[in-house]
Image (spheres, helix red, strand yellow):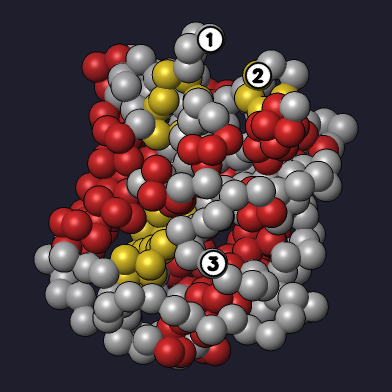
Amino acid sequence: MILAVVAGLLTAAFALTRGRIICAATSLLLISACSSPTAVGAAHPIAAGTGPAPTVQVSGEPSYLALGDSIAFGYRPLPSFADYRNPAAFTAYPEDVARALKLNLVNAACPGETAASMINTGAPSNGCETNARGGAGYRSIAPLHVSYRGSQLSYAVRYLQQHPDTQLVTIGIGANDLFRCEETTADHCAGPDLGRTLAGVTANLDTILSALRNQARYRHTLVVVTYYALNYGKAASVTPVEALNAALAGPAARYGARLANGFAAFRAASARAGGNTCAAGLRIKLASGGCDLHPTTRGQQVLAAAVEAALGTMALR
């Protein structure tokens, strides 16, 4: 009985309700997502009210910090709750990038994180701190790759202050803002709420990148990873993702971050399947039919290649 309840909480944390994935109607993208249209960055530089900044503990000399949501975390559906107790069961593009570039990875991503909740744990989350309806989130049910108190951003700032020679930081955030908006607004984020949500993503990513550059004084390589569409053959799937990625591009440029084009990478990798990323084997197949929003091992490799392409021939330092 307890297992069933916990499994149900995990399901809610990843926005799986009514027997289908939230936002399937608009065919957005990947994580368990949808955020508040209100930007919290200006009022809360870092996680106001979340307690003292955490002490960062890692093994070896760290050189790569990964931030973000369930895509960066490596979330995939597992057969039992016991499997979720082992974070090593989840790997994603950060692990692939770290292996390819011979970097020591610290992955602080949290499934269901929004751009708002990354800054302030009291802001609307979509499965990390809480689910879209305010129920238990992933962090209260299962461990992350690294343990920390407070917000993901407060952890990142303290981490970079303690490890100023970190060579690479990647960030994948924003899709949960759209998913949460789709679930919680009357127009399912199809009207003015979409614009407000995207403006919130932009404002919050500005806050996140500003904190990394100015509070943590991080001067090395930042990469923002853009999102993929579920089906490139359908405008309803492509349009909101392109709008989200455009909302991410402005802050990235303002703070000297490179864009890893996950959108173009998935489009190219699914071309032979008519742009259908499920049929192309880029998303996890479900026993009930169709695919989960999250990438397969191959899909994560495609995203890793996009990160590596964004770095090009530049030397990490």
At a point 54% along the width and 30% down the height, the residue shown is 80
From the image, which quarter does the N terminus lie in?
A: top right
Residue 100, placed above or below residue 244? below
- Taking the image as shown, residue 233 lies to the left or right of residue 121, namely left
Q: Secondary structure at mark 3?
A: loop
Check residue 288 in the rendering and tell me which mark sits there, or answer none. Answer: 1
Check residue 113 in the rendering and tell me which mark sits there, or answer none. Answer: none
- Taking the image as shown, residue 191 lies to the left or right of residue 224, namely right
Find disc 2 in the rendering and name its residue.
20
Gap in angstroms between the C-alphas marked 2 and 3: 31 Å
Residue 225, placed above or below residue 56? above
- Near mark 1 (Cα within 10 A), the count class, few <14, some 14-19 or many ≥20, is few
Residue 196, placed above or below residue 241? below
- Near mark 2 (Cα within 10 A), the count class, few <14, some 14-19 or many ≥20, is few
> Can you name the residue that lies furthest to the left here?
313
Foreground tag (1 vs 2): 1
Residue 243, placed above or below residue 206? above
Examine the image and state in which quarter residue 8 appears.
top right
> Can you name the residue that lies furthest to the top here?
289
At a point 48% along the width and 65% down the height, the residue shown is 146
Instruction: Please name the amino acid that badge 2 sits on.
Output: Arg
Give 57 or 285, whichever is nearer the viewer.
57
At a point 46% along the width and 47% down the height, the residue shown is 86
Q: Earlier in the sequence, mark 2 or mark 3?
A: 2
Gap in angstroms between the C-alphas marked 1 and 2: 10 Å
Instruction: Please name the amino acid that badge 3 sits on.
Output: Ser
Instruction: Please name the amino acid that badge 1 sits on.
Output: Ser
- Near mark 3 (Cα within 10 A), the count class, few <14, some 14-19 or many ≥20, is few
